[in-house]
Amino acid sequence: MHELSVCQGMLAQVSEIARDHGARAASRIVVRVGPLSGVEPALLAQAFPLARAGTVAAEADLVVEPAPVRVRCERCGAETEAAANRLLCGACGDYRTTLTAGDELLLVSVELVREEEVMSAKR
C-alpha cells in the first residue's frame, strides 16, 4: 500500500504551505486523482487518518476529486475523454492519441486555520 507514503509526501507539502502562511493547522485538503496515476483513491482515503496523526492536518478532512482521462488525437486534433484502458479519440476513433490528463495526482487546495481565526472564534 504505497498510498501511505503518498499521504506522507502530501502532508509534508501541506506542512510547508501552512508554515509559509503562518497557519497553525489545515482543516481541509483537496486532491485530484486520475485513474492512470497509480494511486487508488479508496486506499488513499484509508491511509489518510493514519498519516495525518501528529501533523498540522491532524483534524483535516481529505476530499478526493476524480480526474477524467483525456486524449488529444494526432489525426483530427480533437481533445476528448477516453476510457482508462482504451485511449481512442472520441471524435474519429483513431488510436494515435496523446494522453493529456488522467495520470495526475494533484494537491488542489488546502484550507488553513490561523491562530487569530481561532481567537476570534472563541469571543
Image: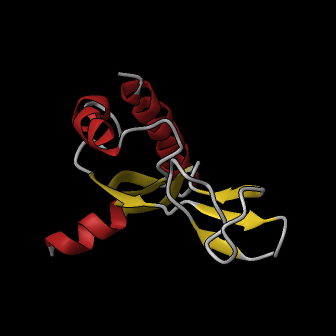
- Looking at the picture, does residue 2 appear above or below residue 66? above
Q: How many marks?
A: 0
| Residue in view at x 81 percent, y 75 percent | 77
Left or right of 78, for residue 61: left
Q: Position of residue 30 (x, y in %)?
A: 40, 59
Front-most of 10 and 72?
72
Left or right of 98, for residue 80: left
Q: Position of residue 72 (x, y in %)?
A: 74, 66
| Residue in view at x 27 percent, y 51 percent | 60
Front-most of 43 and 29?
43
Q: Residue furthest top?
A: 1
Q: Residue furthest left?
A: 122
Q: Position of residue 17 (x, y in %)?
A: 54, 51
> Which quadrant: the N terminus?
top left
| Residue in view at x 22 percent, y 48 percent | 59
Please identify the quarter of the rendering in which residue 61 is found: bottom left
Q: Position of residue 109 (x, y in %)?
A: 47, 62
Front-most of 103 and 95?
95
Please identify the quarter of the rendering in which residue 23 is found: bottom left
Scheme of colours in the image: secondary structure
> Which quadrant: the C terminus?
bottom left
| Residue in view at x 34 percent, y 59 percent | 115
Front-most of 51 and 94?
94
Left or right of 97, for residue 101: left
